[in-house]
Each structure stands twice: as C-alpha cells, then as structure tokens.
Image: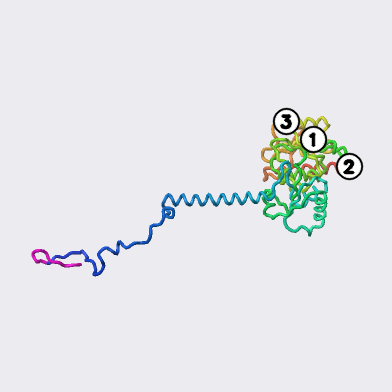
Amino acid sequence: MAVRGDHHGRMKRTDKKGAPKGSGGNKRGLRAKGPTPKAENRPYHAAYRARIQKERREETQAAQRKARAKRSLIQVRRGHQLIAGRNPVLEALESDIPVTRVFVAGNLAANKKLSLLLSKASAQGAPIVEVPRSDLDLATEGAVHQGVALEVPEFEYTDLAELFENAEKNNNKPLIVMLDGVTDPHNLGAIVRSSAAFGASGVVIPGRRSASMNVTAWKASAGAAARLPIARVSNLVNAIKQCKEQGCFVLGLDGGGTSSVRESGLADGPLALVTGAEGEGISRLVKENCDLLTRIEISSDVESLNAAVATGIALFEVAAVRREKAAEN
C-alpha cells in the first residue's frame, strides 16, 4: 500500500503498487517466450491436422506396398491353385496330380516320406522353391500349411456319370453325396473326407451357391479329394432326377425327417444322400424332389449339427447297415 499527499497537503491512501526500482516498468511482461511454432506444429491449427493426416496416409501406403511385395513372392499362376498341408500334399503327389511348383518353408528333411515325394516332384520337372513361412501364410490365406504347398492346375471336376462308373468299378452299390448350399470350404473338405472314409462313390456340388475345392477345402479333406471323384453340376434338381434314373433312392437330411437313415430301410440299396447348409437346410425345390426326409437323433439342447458332422453321421449309419447286410450274406 502507498500513501501520497493531495494538492491540499493532505495524506491520501492508495492501493496502487509502484514499480520496483530497476524493473523497467512492464518490460518483464513483454519478455519474449521464444519463436512462434510453425502452424503445422500447433495442435489446434488446421495445418497440424493436415500434416497428421498426410503422415497416416503415407504410413498406410507404405504398409500396402510392403504387403504387395510380400504377396508377389508367391504368385499362383492363372488356372492354378495351391494344395497346402503335409497330408494333402502327400495324397496329391501319390495320385500323380501334375505339379508345377513346390513351395517349402523351413527344413522338411526330417520327414523322410515327404522328402522322397518332393524329390519325385522335382524329378518330374516341378521346381522346389524355398520361401519364408510368412509368405506361405499369405499365399494360403491362413490355411494350416505345415510348411509345404503345391501349385497344381485348378481342381478338375468330373461329371455325375463318372460317380456311377466309380461305384461299378469297385463293385459297390452307388452312394452319392449331394450338397445343397454348403458354402463353407471347411465343411466341403470334411464331407469329402468322410465320404471317402465311408465308401461313398463321390460327391456332387452345384455350380452356384457352393464352396469349391480351394486350398482350404483340400486341407480339410486331408487329401481325400485326390482319391474321390467330385462332380459339379449346373442344376442339383436335374442331378437328383438322374440319380433316380440310375435306380437310386434319394434321402434328404432334415430336422423334420420322419425316420433315421437306418430306420428308412433304404441304406443297403443304391442311394443318394442330400445335405443342406446348417440353419438353412435343404432348399424347398430340392426337398420336394427327395424320396424321403431323414433325421439324425440329437439332444433337445442342441438346435442343429453343421453339414459336415451331420453328413458324417449319416454316412456312418449307411456304412454300418451295409456291413451288417454283407455279413448276413
């Protein structure tokens, strides 16, 4: 607090504080705080936001270029596909499927059988290409490749007539597995595997609304796709009619079926077994063309089984009935 006199000589109180000696008045408040940051470095400036966005774009583009470079290390040729995993590779090589290239990640010399078969592929003119495991991961789209993959011509589907020829050649009654709307390649591969295991004559898939025999289906089939004929048809209903013309009864797997496969009394004869996708089931038109709808008895706590499991159980029942009938004779 300062005290000063007025023009009459009287003392007057004031709260104004005088500047300290040597302070230079308000010069301290005007002291420079350093250079002003550039606009692109000020967080609340539009130029700063633009710089951050540009850096992010450049990082994304760099990552995409890197990914493209990785993918380019294994470029599957047009009209070809990959078969991945040791068992599928073994089955394919033993079946004399033409191989254009063999991709290997890591040392597979410890597996003597595979080493011999790879040597066979090499002797046939198929080069063995060593690649990083990460590149094989990309090329097989996440399938379990176990460090080896073959590049082969795209899967060669057969026609329905060959499935009946296959049954006749093996002295078996026809057992045709027909898939309606099964779009998961894992399910397709597993069904092919079960079909081969339980003596089916072959598998039929429609040209539309169906999984194809890609690298995932090959892997799930554990190589059975190299042994079992798979027919692709343009119209599943017409294929069902052809099966009937060949003397087959057509059983459709459906939750609302009136009997089990065994109870149907048809398992020992020429048979076509139709499976639909989980949830959707067999389509209306296909269902109408089945001779009988059969069910699989399951717990009431479970709504449904996936296509591969349901087909496997039904095929097991057919195989069991046929073994029993054969033993009786």
Overall secondary structure of the magenta stretch? Answer: loop
Asked which secondary structure carries label 2, the reply is helix
Q: Say how the picture is coloured.
A: rainbow
Q: Residue 288 — which label?
A: 3
Q: Residue 58 — which label?
A: none
Viewer-side label of 3, 1:
1
Q: Which residue is mark 2?
A: 326
Q: Amino acid at mark 2?
A: Ala
Q: Residue furthest right?
A: 329
Residue at mark 2 to residue at mark 3: CA–CA distance: 32 Å
Q: Position of residue 148 (x, y in %)?
A: 74, 53
Q: Sequence-wise, which precedes: disc 2 or disc 3?
A: 3
Of 82 and 264, nearer the camera is 82
Name the side, left or right, on which 29 lies relative to 168: left
Asked which secondary structure carries label 1, the reply is loop
Q: Give the residues in magenta.
A: 1-10
Say if 159 sits above or below 49 in the image. Answer: above
In reply to whether residue 127 is colored magenta, the answer given is no
The quadrant the N terminus occupies is: bottom left
Report the residue at 77% width, 35% height from top: 251
Q: Residue 159 — which label?
A: 1
Q: Amino acid at mark 1?
A: Asp
Label 2: few (<14), some (14–19) or many (≥20) C-alpha neighbours in 10 Å: few
Say if 276 sits above or below 96 in the image. Answer: above
Of 113 and 55, nearer the camera is 55
